[in-house]
Image (spheres, rainbow, N blue to C red):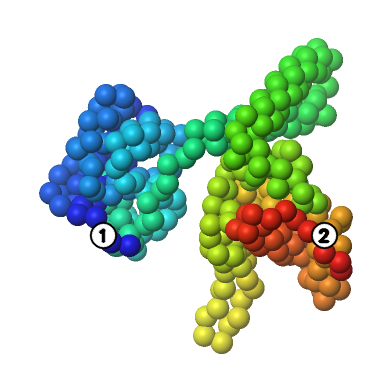
């Protein structure tokens, strides 16, 4: 990758962004209004703007940068914090964070984040809303099991009925969103040819793993949090663990791997071999999830549907 002329680090907050321009060593605070962000994005053209994923607060900045055609890289907050520690910067303020992000951009040259398709972005919002509703339903069901008060039990039952209705409405919107976009519909159709992937899991993978088919099997496994990482030191050989990556994708693929290892002959045999060799059940299912991800990645790379393989 050719380095840009400049790198600008941006720390994102709700009402403003703090920026640090590497070439001038200057800090600036910019309000997160549409007009102010548009001016900043135009002024930053030709540089690489590096910022953290901030729970959605970064979206107006991303939109402004994409509209202006300014290169930007959205990085994992943990990665930025570890870079700060590695460089001896233990303090954490908005100005310090912006500077750290700029220096990280220069040192590591992160790959620019590609603009998100509006249809996929809306699907991601719907999937996030579904996650919230499912979590709320789970909490209320737990409360219903422990309450002793009849009035509270009745109130919880009423709230659960409302939440279930909202969940049904969101599921309908998700299905309509996938069907309305030809590219998403084709991705969804291809995913559902795989045992273990139904409508809910399909939506998560389409919305949150657009890199399917565009990375090699090692990088896609690392991105999904399913790559085993070594823990060796000297003569010590520690256990390999999966960590990092996108936790929601890891959970989705774990569930898909569990289901597929019951109904797909090849994955069922693979899981059985691992368990016969003494691997714990969770380790075997995680391995099935990683193998399933490799299959999905190859399917999307080659534009082919899943083919059932014999054990």
Please report the residue visible at 76 percent of the width from the left and 42 percent of the height from the top: 198
Answer yes or no: is residue 177 visible.
no
The image quadrant that residue 220 belongs to is bottom right
Please report the residue visible at 69 percent of the width from the left and 52 percent of the height from the top: 253
Decide: is 181 above or below 254: above
Q: Quadrant of the image for the C terminus?
A: bottom right
- Determine whether label 1 and label 2 are within 8 Å by CB: no
Which residue lies under the disc numbered 1?
3
Residue 309 image label: none
Marks 1 and 2, the one that precedes in the sequence? 1
| Coordinates of residue 86 in the picture (x, y in percent) | 34, 63
Answer yes or no: is residue 112 visible.
yes
Which of the pair 284/301 is nearer the observer? 301
Q: Is residue 297 left or right of residue 41?
A: right
The image quadrant that residue 149 belongs to is top right
Tell me the element at label 1.
loop
Decide: is 142 above or below 222: above
Which of the pair 39/188 is nearer the observer? 188
- Name the mark nearer the viewer: 1 or 2: 2
Tell me the element at label 2.
loop
Residue that protrudes farthest toward the left in the picture: 24
| Coordinates of residue 171 in the picture (x, y in percent) | 71, 28
| Coordinates of residue 148 in the picture (x, y in percent) | 83, 22
Which residue lies under the disc numbered 2?
308
Q: Is residue 141 left or right of residue 238?
A: right
């Amino acid at each position: 990758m050719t380095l840009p002329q400049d790198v600008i680090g941006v720390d994102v907050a709700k009402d403003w962004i703090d920026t640090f321009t590497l070439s001038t060593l200057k800090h600036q605070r910019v309000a997160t209004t549409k007009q102010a962000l548009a001016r900043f994005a135009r002024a930053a053209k030709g540089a690489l703007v590096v910022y953290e994923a901030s729970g959605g607060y970064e979206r107006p900045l991303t939109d402004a940068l994409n509209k202006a055609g300014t290169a930007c890289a959205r990085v994992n907050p943990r990665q930025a914090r570890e870079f700060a520690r590695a460089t001896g910067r233990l303090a954490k303020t908005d100005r310090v964070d912006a500077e750290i992000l700029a220096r990280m951009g220069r040192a590591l040259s992160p790959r620019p984040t590609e603009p998100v398709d509006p249809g996929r972005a809306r699907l991601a919002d719907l999937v996030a809303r579904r996650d919230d509703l499912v979590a709320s339903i789970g909490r209320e069901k737990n409360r219903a099991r422990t309450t002793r008060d009849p009035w509270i039990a009745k109130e919880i039952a009423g709230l659960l009925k409302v939440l279930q209705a909202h969940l049904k409405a969101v599921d309908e919107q998700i299905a309509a969103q996938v069907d309305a976009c030809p590219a998403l519909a084709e991705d969804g159709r291809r995913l559902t040819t795989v045992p273990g992937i139904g409508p809910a899991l399909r939506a998560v993978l389409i919305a949150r793993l657009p890199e399917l088919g565009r990375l090699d099997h090692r990088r896609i496994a690392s991105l999904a949090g399913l790559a085993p990482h070594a823990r060796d030191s000297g003569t010590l050989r520690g256990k390999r663990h999966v960590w990092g990556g996108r936790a929601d994708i890891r959970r989705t693929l774990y569930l898909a791997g569990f289901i597929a290892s019951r109904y797909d002959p090849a994955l069922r045999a693979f899981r059985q071999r691992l368990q016969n060799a003494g691997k714990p059940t969770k380790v075997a299912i995680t391995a099935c999830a990683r193998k399933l991800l490799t299959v999905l990645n190859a399917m999307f790379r080659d534009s082919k549907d899943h083919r059932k393989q014999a054990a």
